[in-house]
Amino acid sequence: MVAYVIRRCLALVFVVFVISVITFVIMYSVPGGPFEERQMPLQGAQRENILRKYGMTGSIFERYIAYVSNALRGDFGYSFFSPTERVQDLIARVWGPTLILGGITIAISLPLGVWLGILAAKHKGSPLDLIVNTFATSMTVIPGFVIAVALILTFSARIRLLPSGGWGGPEHLVLPVIAYALGPTATLIRYVRGLTLDELGLDYVRTARAKGLAEHLIIPRHVFKNLMIPLVTVFGPTIPLILTGSVFIETTFRIPGLGQYLVSSSVNRDYPMVMALTLIMAVIWGITLLVTDILYVKLDPRVEL
């Protein structure tokens, strides 16, 4: 296990290196930029000082070496559009709302999706199953931003119960969390329902019933542990997506989170921000996949790494 984790960490370092090279080369190879003369008509020493501050002097190879050298020391430079603030400080500030929103979304959607999926499977063909299935199918096909707009029109514009956007108090979290959590919850319901139905038809369940085990104990004692690996496979990759922000949700509810910055940085060609956000996401994805693999072993000792 330890050797495997070390190999995966080394592989992650290599992947992050490759991603950094590709991202850096693509960014600086595209013609134009935020400091081209048409957008920023500066001359002489003033222009030279600005380019030097943002590490845009020298060849692309020299710029990359300087960037990596600074990044390894924890310095990702200054944002082009927030010149007084270092990139790492800016990300730390805007990531807070995204982590809070994403963390609550995961805490709600994971248990709720599993519970409703198992409940629907246990009552297959009943009105409850039909309601849960209809809900899950609807929430899967309806885009998140449509749900977000519908929630704002209902609870903010019509009922005037909750704010339509902003950030600060708990009341600002209610609608974004609902809009954000419905998609993952619906996906989990459909997945868990199908898996549970498959498991309930297997021999070991029939054996448990033949031995007289009460029906309400079969799923928690026997079926649930067999659902864990598929659940980890499905929900594991969703976690980094949730924790790095939803552009639609954050834009619709005016949440100053990471998702908004990722898009605006790409559009405005804020190179230091784009590089830092790309590397952070690569690391989060790598760590998530590593944790997922380790969980496989913990959940099923037959799995070998």
Image (spheres, grey):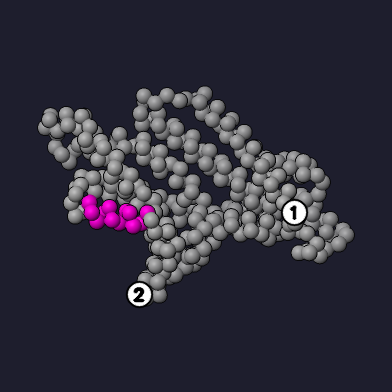
Q: Nearer the viewer, mark 1 or mark 2?
A: 1
Q: Earlier in the sequence, mark 1 or mark 2?
A: 1
Residue 37 picture location, percent across and down? 80, 62
In the image, what residue occupies the spot 18% across and 38% down?
A: 217
Q: Of residues 104 and 28, which is closer to you in this image? A: 28
Q: Is residue 56 above or below residue 230?
A: below
Q: For the stretch drawn in magenta, what is the main secondary structure?
A: helix
Residue under numbered circle 1 = 31
The picture quadrant where one finds residue 207 is top left
The picture quadrant where one finds residue 23 is top right
| Label 1 element class | loop
Residue 94 shows up from this direction: no
- Residue 5: in magenta span: no
In the rendered structure, which amino acid carries the disc numbered 1? Pro
Q: Is residue 46 above or below residue 2?
A: below
State which region is magenta: 129-140
